[in-house]
Amino acid sequence: MALGPLKFKDLGEEEEEEEKNLDSVKALTAKLKLQTRRPSYLEWAARVQSRAWLEGGSGQGSPGERQATASGGICGFDTMDDALRWLRNELREMQTQDQQLAQRLMRLRGQIHGLKVEQVCRRHKELLDEDSDLLCTIPPRAAFLLSTPLKHIGLTRMNINSRRFSLC
């Protein structure tokens, strides 16, 4: 069994398809005017926008102050460790929210499946009740004379085996 040639990408190199997918997601997000509602992201964005390091290139102040501002302003955080700590906390929170959402979706899926089973069982019971009523109206003598006693009411082997009673 021969495998095709392996393709290795350089670090930072993206495929055109990935870029197209990302562009389509960005376009859809812009079209629907979607924005994040995470309070931590909004706090971080406000903190970044209010920082003086955004206008730090004006040349005002002593060289020591400019260096402290430049080194202390990593995307609105004092140090890289603070930024990484915040990012880790955000990722943990997102992971727990994803797990909770997945659990809710699985419960909903189970409930939907249960409702489908109940509906199919109810329909099957109704059909059996109707057919049993029809069978009761057949004279016993006529039932034994017919080679297929249920054929005259439209119940055939194909009807019984049909997908109508499937739970899938």
Image (cartoon, grey):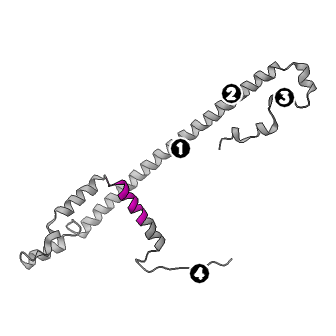
Q: Callout 2: few (<14), some (14-19), or many (20+) C-alpha neighbours within 10 Å?
A: few
Q: Earlier in the sequence, mark 4 or mark 1?
A: 4
* Real-space Cα separation, disc 1 to disc 3, in angstroms: 41 Å
Residues in magenta, as a range = 23-36
Q: Earlier in the sequence, mark 4 or mark 3?
A: 4
Dot 2 and dot 3 residues touching (CB under 8 Å) = no
Residue closer to the observer: 12 or 90: 12
Q: Callout 1: few (<14), some (14-19), or many (20+) C-alpha neighbours within 10 Å?
A: few
* Real-space Cα separation, disc 1 to disc 2, in angstroms: 26 Å
Residue closer to the observer: 112 or 79: 112
102 vs 35, left or right, is: right
Image depth: mark 1 or mark 2 in front: 2
Magenta stretch: includes residue 66? no
Residue 14: quadrant of the picture: bottom left
* Real-space Cα separation, disc 4 to disc 3, in angstroms: 65 Å
The amino acid sitting under disc 3 is: His
Dot 4 and dot 2 residues touching (CB under 8 Å) = no
Q: Which residue is mark 2?
A: 126
Q: Which residue is mark 3?
A: 152
Q: Position of residue 46 (x, y in %)?
A: 21, 58
* Real-space Cα separation, disc 4 to disc 1, in angstroms: 41 Å
Q: Callout 4: few (<14), some (14-19), or many (20+) C-alpha neighbours within 10 Å?
A: few
Image depth: mark 1 or mark 3 in front: 3
Marker disc for residue 109: 1
* Real-space Cα separation, disc 2 to disc 3, in angstroms: 19 Å
Q: Position of residue 119 (x, y in %)?
A: 61, 33
Q: Position of residue 76 (x, y in %)?
A: 21, 65
Q: Main secondary structure of the magenta part?
A: helix
